[in-house]
């Protein structure tokens, strides 16, 4: 179960943190045939959680996520389609800074969100 949650679902504690106080979100649904996913991961004892809805719209070159969690921040590491480059990322209609991270042949858009709020994120790519 841990491999599924930390792998495909992409929710894990960032190094040096626990109870999803500053989790890393790295969903890998782009590697599946699933374009729409809802996921919630929770530590029962601490009530720490991360929840998101993931929608990939390849025809619009867009990944939309609605993300929330109990932590102070959420570190996002979003896997992009093969050969895609992000051109803009917005959170709740505000442009946010991001970096592009290359891991072997895969490209990721990395950015940070404030935790405790519902963030509607749009990752536009070309």
Image: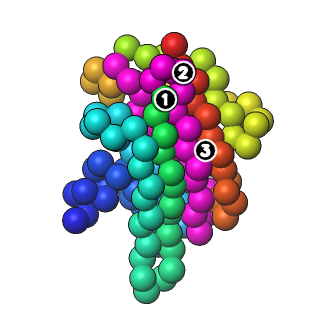
Q: Residue at x 77, y 36 (%)?
A: 94
Extreme residue in the bottom direction: 45
Name the disc covering residue 49, or none.
Answer: none
Helix or strand or loop: what does disc 1 sit on? strand
Answer yes or no: is residue 124 visible.
Answer: yes
Q: CA distance from mark 3 to mark 2?
A: 24 Å
- Stretch in magenta: 58-82
Name the disc covering residue 57, or none.
Answer: 1
Which of pointers 3 and 2 lies earlier in the amino acid sequence? Answer: 2
Magenta-drawn stretch contains 73: yes
Q: Residue at x 31, y 55 (%)?
A: 6
Q: Residue at x 27, y 24 (%)?
A: 104
* Residue that numbered label 3 is attached to: 112
Q: Would residue 55 be found to the left or right of residue 27 on screen?
A: right
Picture quadrant of residue 83: top left
Q: Would residue 33 be found to the left or right of residue 123 on screen?
A: left
């Amino acid at each position: 179960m841990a491999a599924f949650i930390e792998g495909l679902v992409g929710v894990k504690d960032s190094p040096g943190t626990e109870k999803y106080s500053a989790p890393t979100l790295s969903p890998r649904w782009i590697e599946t045939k699933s374009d729409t996913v809802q996921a919630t991961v929770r530590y029962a004892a601490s009530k720490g959680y991360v929840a998101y809805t993931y929608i990939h719209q390849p025809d619009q070159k867009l990944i939309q996520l609605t993300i929330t969690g109990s932590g102070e921040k959420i570190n996002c590491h979003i896997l992009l389609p093969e050969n895609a480059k992000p051109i803009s990322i917005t959170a709740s209609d505000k442009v946010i800074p991001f970096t592009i991270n290359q891991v072997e042949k895969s490209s990721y858009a990395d950015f940070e969100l404030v935790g405790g709020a519902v963030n509607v994120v749009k990752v536009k790519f070309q």
